[in-house]
Amino acid sequence: MAKFDYLMWKVCLKFKPDIFLSVGSMYAAQVSAILRKPHICIEDTYNMEQVRLYRPFTELILTGDYPHPVMSETNEFRMAGYNELAYLHPKRFTPDESVLHKLGVKANEKYTIVRFVAWNATHDLGQIGISSKNKIKAVQKFSQYSKVFISSEGQLPEDLSPYRLPTPPSCIHDVIAFASLVFGESSTMSEEAAILGVPSIYLNNKSTYYTQHLEKDYQLMYNITESEEDQQKSIELGIDLLQQNDMSMWKERRDKMLRDRIDVTEFLCWIVNNYPNSKQVLIENPDYQYRFK
């Protein structure tokens, strides 16, 4: 047993949980099996190298209702929600406008969040993201129409260091909520922007099922490949978006999305508090989930 498995097992022996809830954690799944407790998993990345390790020990896999690979013929339930709605639904999150002072921007002043990732996850194999040349170009171009702040997992080129986001990570959703554009390599941050009604451009050769759904069904974001041609197009698209002065269209699209989606937090609480009866209810009546609006 891996060291992290052992530590979790030791904690759980003391804590004595009745149920395990995770976002695709093979460790939680394995420990739950050892302790003979149910494991409920929320899945949205569909990285099969991870899924294969937790699926045998998982009683219920909650996935989105958009097109994606089948996780389980018997234990999968497709919910009308995104993982990020669990913490960004209007019932759960109210943006704090004081973050503008921390950023040094005025109310209604445009700013762009540029996000770079480290490309060291298992599902990032073979990807390199935006070139250094185009990172600099994007920042320079966007700076002509807005302030620019960079959120980066790794070291920034010297030319871009002055643009590093000054706020702590705990403020990131407030920062996104008041932005005019989110541009970069992070699927999660791009989706968070879309859910908050902020236009986002996501560059990734593989894209994701949920970001594709947000683009196709709600026109809340753009999925673009990492090719040199598309990197250039994405910068031009970013400029076009920054030149828009009316953000009401994006708020309307967000409102439509929210009308179609459930309150994921309330739904999860009901499942856990009523398990295993809740699983049987969902099997018999999948539309029961729409009570959690």
Image (tube, rainbow, N blue to C red):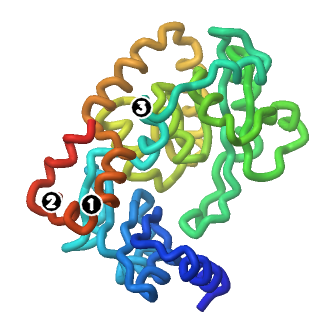
Mark 1 element type? loop
The answer to whether any part of residue 280 appears in the image is yes
Dot 3 amino acid type: Lys
Residue 239 got which mark?
Answer: none
Dot 1 amino acid type: Asn
Density class for disc 1 (Cα within 10 Å; few <14, some 14-19, many ≥20) is few
Determine whether 290 is above or below 98 in the image.
below
Residue at label 1? 274
> Residues under labels 2 and 1: Cα distance?
10 Å
Query: Residue 39: where, in percent of width, then height?
Result: 38, 73
Tell me which residue sits at (37%, 38%) in the image: 214
Density class for disc 3 (Cα within 10 Å; few <14, some 14-19, many ≥20) is few
Query: Residue 196: where, in percent of width, then height?
Result: 48, 29
Residue at label 3? 91
Q: Quadrant of residue 230?
A: top right
In-image side of 111 versus 208 (left or right): right
Which is closer to the viewer, label 3 or label 1?
Answer: 1
Disc nearer the start of the sequence (3/1): 3
Residue at label 2? 281
The answer to whether any part of residue 179 appears in the image is no
Tags 2 and 1 in contact by the CB under 8 Å rule?
Answer: yes
Tags 3 and 1 in contact by the CB under 8 Å rule?
Answer: no
Tell me which residue sits at (36%, 67%) in the image: 40
> Residues under labels 3 and 2: Cα distance?
25 Å
